[in-house]
Image (cartoon, rainbow, N blue to C red):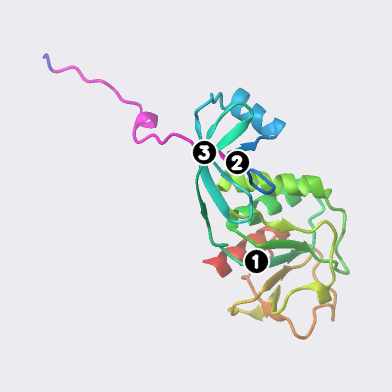
Amino acid sequence: MGGASRRTVRPSRLGAVKHTPHLLLDGAWSGESLPLSEGQRHHLGRVLRLTEGATVTYTDGEGNFGTGTLAEGVVIRGQERTVPRPSNLEVAVAPPASRDRQRFLVEKLAELGVARLRWIRTVHGQERLAPLPKLSSWVGAAVEQSRGAWAMKVDADPCGWDDLTPPVVVCALGGGARVGNPATVVVGPEGGFAPGEIPAAATLWDLGPTVLRVETAALVAVARLLA
């Protein structure tokens, strides 16, 4: 029995949206164009196979966001605007021992819009941190991935409790179920806090009945506070 022929359309072709690369271009912007790093030139040209005239977006990590066009080793500046900071929240975390877990934590907190990541010195914690250039590169990758306009600040060295911005909320079993609007949220080491280590002025916050990994607890806390 005959009938009209039908053409199959692959789902990937339906509603396809062209990807526009997003770039973190540090430094004071001046002139009509902004230089690209060697890594950015390689990624845009060799990996994404973009040619001159392609549209890109860019930010300085300080709230300035623009849309421009790709040229030889530079971005020609176009329309620009200032984006408000999504959050002033600071997060203080006892560093995970694994560098892969440190990277995961840095990238995800940066994608969520955390203003600053600090590493807190604790009794049961460790202080083996990735070097600052590596931490900064992880933040940059997260900004470009999430198309953000603000780059999270990340400290190179651990800090003490007295260095944290109050009011401080500490994620700990046995705390309250809700908190107000803290300036800093703290996540402790895998071994937990030592008796008497948490300052009396801090508010304890219980994230739930299960014991979470450091990076999981930090993401859960931030997601709840920024929701």
Looking at the rendering, the stretch of residues picked out in magenta corresponds to 4-23
Mark 1: few, some, or many residues within 10 Å (few <14, many ≥20)?
few
Q: Earlier in the sequence, mark 1 or mark 2?
A: 2
Q: Is residue 182 magenta?
A: no
The residue under the point 70% across, 53% down is: 106
Q: Is residue 121 left or right of residue 150?
A: right
Indicate the quadrant containing the N terminus: top left, top right, bottom left or bottom right.
top left
Residue marked by disc 3? 68
Tell me the tag on residue 109: none
Q: Residues within 10 Å of mark 3 (few under 14, many from 20)?
A: many
**As displayed, is residue 40 above or below residue 181?**
above
- Give the percent coordinates (x, y) of residue 74: 62, 32
- Give the CA separation, mark 3 to mark 1: 47 Å
Asked whether 15 falls inside the magenta stretch, the response is yes
148 vs 10, left or right, is: right
Give amino acid for label 3: Gly
Dot in front, 1 or 2: 2
Gap in Å between the C-alphas at discs 1 and 2?
A: 39 Å
Q: Please tell me in which quadrant of the rendered image residue 105 appears.
A: bottom right
State the image coordinates of residue 209 (x, y, percent, origin top left): 63, 70
Residue identifier under label 1: 210
Q: Earlier in the sequence, mark 3 or mark 2?
A: 2
